[in-house]
């Protein structure tokens, strides 16, 4: 049985796969494989643990979990172990365009119109990670090596993962170590990411008016401001903006930051939330985009952000990564496929080729959509603002199309 303490003894050829990356996607992939009867080793250092205090009650990094992601966590018996008071259901999504008055585009999606209780769930990264990490305590077949991966070495029977502590031979390596994956680079599968020359600025805000479980988003020319509801009178702000603006924004005093936020969309933010008060620090992360041309080759698999990086405006980055693991679970659940894998080993090329085809087909439309929206709202051509805002107005008046868009986002 695995436990939360790192393993110190790694027998040769004792694992079906090594998962490089101790983040959410890597842990979910480990649980999926272990529950399918495989023995896996998670390799990587645990991310810095977030500890709430009076200044910083909420983890600044939050996720919007789709229905399919929730089902994955439920099947792994993780969902019910997440404290309900740490999860904020979203019942409505409101989106505004970058014009004003009657010309401003607007979209509203509600859970009731889509036939579900909630559109999505907002959860802190640290809370989700803690629940997954604890699940490994009770799941046979998972070990954890708390070490830094320094490279890969090609062996006759697969690969050897080289760490600062030891070298581990495995037939299959799953790279789940993020957008800047070094494992991907060591395996010769690296690819160039498109740099948006922009950053996502995140912080937590206390609000005066209740959010009523609504997630709100404002397109403001070359920036996108999202307010995600948190438990109690709080929201998580995610503001995507050009690098030149983000660096200047981070230098502002808290009161000046708030004035900038409240000024978006002619004061609509203040109208929705009333007074805003920063809770904790403000952070920024770079925005990039890209999809790996090859997700599996010669016994190495790319998963999560190691395979695909997406703009955060749709909140689908983590969901796509969890769906990578979910699709693997679906393939392994097939009795015919499971028997073949058990006979040939987890490194069976046919299995991973099928997985790669399915995941590429599912990921590329979302990548195209988010990249296209980002490009569309940055266009500064005559009439461009009118076209995109009018388009939003038209979509908002078509219930069937709105329902389909909601279903695609929820999956």
Image (tube, rainbow, N blue to C red):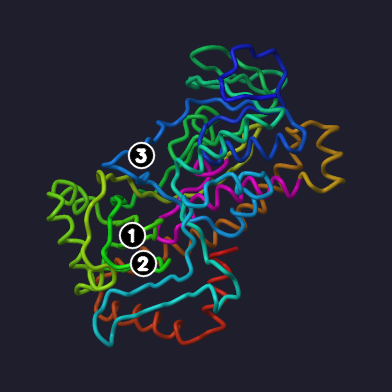
Image position, residue 17 (x, y; %)? 67, 28
Question: At x 34% / y 67%, what residue is drawn?
Answer: 210
Mark 3 highlights which residue?
A: 52
The answer to whether residue 286 is above or below residue 30 is: below
Q: Which mark sits nearer the N-terminus, 1 or 2?
A: 2
User: Which is more N-terminal, label 2 or label 3?
Assistant: 3
Marks 1 and 3, the one that precedes in the sequence: 3
- Image position, residue 326 (x, y; %): 66, 49
Alpha carbon distance from label 3 to label 2 = 22 Å
Residues drawn in magenta: 303-331
Q: Specify the quadrant that holds the N terminus.
A: top right
Mark seen at residue 233: 1
Q: Which residue is mark 2?
A: 211
Q: Dot 1 lies on which element?
A: loop
Q: Distance of mark 1 from mark 2, alpha carbons? A: 7 Å
Relative depth, front residue between 85 and 187 = 85
Residue 9, quarter of the rendered image: top right
Main secondary-structure element of the magenta-colored stretch: helix
């Amino acid at each position: 049985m695995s436990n939360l303490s790192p393993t110190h003894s790694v027998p040769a050829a004792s694992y079906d796969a090594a998962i490089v990356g101790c983040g959410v996607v890597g842990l979910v992939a480990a649980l999926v494989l272990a529950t399918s009867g495989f023995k896996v080793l998670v390799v990587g250092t645990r991310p810095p643990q977030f500890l709430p205090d009076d200044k910083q009650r909420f983890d600044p990094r939050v996720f919007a979990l789709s229905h399919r992601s929730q089902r994955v966590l439920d099947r792994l018996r993780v969902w019910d172990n997440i404290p309900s008071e740490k999860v904020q259901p979203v019942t409505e999504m409101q989106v505004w365009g970058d014009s004003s008055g009657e010309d401003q585009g607007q979209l509203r999606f509600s859970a009731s119109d889509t036939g579900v209780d909630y559109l999505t769930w907002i959860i802190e990264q640290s809370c989700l990670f803690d629940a997954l990490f604890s699940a490994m305590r009770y799941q046979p077949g998972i070990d954890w090596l708390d070490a830094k991966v320094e490279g890969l070495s090609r062996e006759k029977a697969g690969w050897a993962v080289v760490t600062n502590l030891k070298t581990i031979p495995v037939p299959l390596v799953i790279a789940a170590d993020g957008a800047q994956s070094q494992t991907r680079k060591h395996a010769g599968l690296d690819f160039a990411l498109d740099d948006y020359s922009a950053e996502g600025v995140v912080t937590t805000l206390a609000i005066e008016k209740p959010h009523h479980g609504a997630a709100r988003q404002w397109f403001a020319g070359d920036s996108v401001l999202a307010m995600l509801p948190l438990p109690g009178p709080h929201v998580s702000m995610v503001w995507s903006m050009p690098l030149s603006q983000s660096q200047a924004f981070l230098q502002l005093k808290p009161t000046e930051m708030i004035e900038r936020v409240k000024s978006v969309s002619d004061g609509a933010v203040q109208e929705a939330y009333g007074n805003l008060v920063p809770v904790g620090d403000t952070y920024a992360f770079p925005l990039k985009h890209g999809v790996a041309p090859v997700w599996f080759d010669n016994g190495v698999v790319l998963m999560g952000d190691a395979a695909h990086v997406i703009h955060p405006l749709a909140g689908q980055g983590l969901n796509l990564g969890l769906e990578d693991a979910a699709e693997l679970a679906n393939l392994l659940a097939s009795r015919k496929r499971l028997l073949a894998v058990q006979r040939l080993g987890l490194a069976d090329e046919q299995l991973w080729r099928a997985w790669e085809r399915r995941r590429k087909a599912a990921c590329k439309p979302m990548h195209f959509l988010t990249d296209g929206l980002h490009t569309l709202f940055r266009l500064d051509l005559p009439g461009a603002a009118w076209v995109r805002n009018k388009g939003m107005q038209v979509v908002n008046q078509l219930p069937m199309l709105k329902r389909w868009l909601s279903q695609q986002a929820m999956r």
